Image (tube, grey):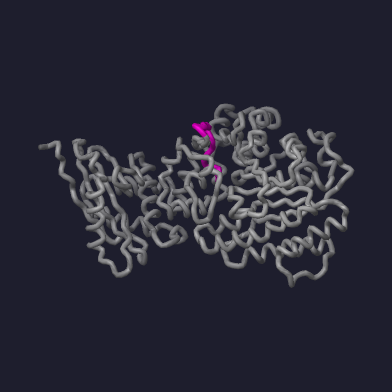
Amino acid sequence: MFLPLGMSDFKELRTGNYYYVDKTHSIHDLLKSGGRYYFLSRPRRFGKSLLVSTLQCLFEGEKELFKGLYIEDKWDWSTKYPVLRLNFDGEYNVSGALKTDVKDQLTIFEEEYELGDVAVISESRRLQNLLQHLHQKTGQLVVVLVDEYDCPILDTLTNKELAINNREYLKIFYRQLKSCSQHIRFVFVTGITMFSKASLFSGLNHLNDISLDPRYNSICGYTDHDIDTVFAEEIKDLDREEIRRWYNGYRWLGEEKVYNPYGVLLLFDAKEFYSWWFETGTPTYLYQYLSQENSLNLDSFENCWGSREELTVFEVDQVKPEALFFQSGYLTIAQKKQPERKIWYLLTYPNLEVRDGVYHGLLQFLGTNTHKAEQDGKKLIKLLSEGDFTSFETELYSLLAGIPHQCYQGDSFEGVYQAYLWIIFKTIGVKCEAEKSTNKGTSDFILYYQNQIFVMELKMVRSGENKDTVLAKAIEQIKTRGYAEEYRNSGKEIHLLGLAFSKEDRNVVDIAHEKLADDSAN
């Protein structure tokens, strides 16, 4: 049998000689529950599109495709429903691209169902006409499937104006699913993120979010049982525990952990343990957003607690980094607690593939790789440890010149430089902390090396500002906010460093250094 690599078409899978993991038990449970409007969030490459395709074939009554599956003798095949399937898998980072895509998709449906010339009316009205026409023409209620609903917003996350425009456009469009409920049999929406109902689905206040419903924990992805039975032939020559360590670990409050299907399938194909999921592309939107928020200390995400309210809401203008990481699939739920009335989740990296991949992804985002980062990190730490801050600035200038221009978004670039320093030193095993809190504030970057500690404050030189004044403020901020106070009596050399960066040059322009006196010597 063939591995279904990159395949998301249920019919193609079932008519070809491909492995297929039966998810129709979960689908049957969902459909017999009696609801009509459902939403599911899962990470990219996790089988969402295949699930949507399965639902489409089911409602269209393609019985022969379900032969031997759980749902075969449990579904009424005598009724076939008209299906509208909307796919938002294009590119939407240009104004007007979303509107054009929606128009094109609606035109295809209108031509298929001979609806006539409707180009002069709005897209939301065209959707309304389609639902009404299909109901009347077929005598059956309409099924609406929306795949990757949030792509138009994730594509524009670092352009908040465009992201908000896209969100508002979709809000009006989706509102028809509520106003046309008399024509609708079933609605299923999938995506990566969990936008609040108020912000995007304001009309669908009865949309049932099953993302964290334990009953549907494994509606996408593979279980241990799936690996051991369906793929028994593929795992014969592989270390079973290594498969778990690399690719298992996702939980959406279910008892059983789930594998990312994409990484596992590529393992079976290549017979090599690797972070395959990240080979499909670095999640640029994730790193761009985190760099803007100065939140690229990836260590801080592991074993962190977040409330259900914080982790299950995604707003364009207010996103918690932990929520973005969790909903994008880079963190999973390890534990749940509910002191009093509030639910809290302990988050962690699900497996080795993600833990390794997310670090390598940051390196790629910043235009480097592990080997180069190791070389560059060793150069920089040597210069710092020798107290050669002039050469350190020169070397840093050369290295920062290699950061791709796409990394620079928004008004401040401090997060990009902070991320670069953090990942470079992290790669060579030097202890460092970004955004470390004290009782008076939060320091930008602290580096610990042998008997020395380097406390750094990063500042952008704005138009009209003097860089010397900016550097003086940086050093003063380290002192007045006590960023180095906890190390004063450590017996180690404490170095205060102010780093000034130019927005126009997109690079470091000067460095100020001051050595902190060690009171323990008195």
Figure label count: 0
Find residue 116 and report its image quarter: bottom right
Magenta-span inclusion, residue 336: yes
Farthest-out residue, left: 522
Of the 4 image quadrants, the one containing the C terminus is top left
- Residue 147: percent from left, percent from top: 68, 51
Q: Nearer the viewer, residue 66 or 85?
A: 85
Using the rendered image of the protein, determine whether residue 86 is visible from the camera's viewpoint.
yes
- Residue 128: percent from left, percent from top: 76, 61
* Vertical placement of residue 8 versus 351, above or below: below
Of the 4 image quadrants, the one containing the N terminus is top right
Q: Nearer the viewer, residue 459 or 201?
A: 201
Residue at 55% over, 63% down: 162
Q: Nearer the viewer, residue 83 or 371?
A: 83
Q: Magenta residues?
A: 327-340
* Vertical placement of residue 400 versus 185, above or below: below
Magenta-span inclusion, residue 85: no
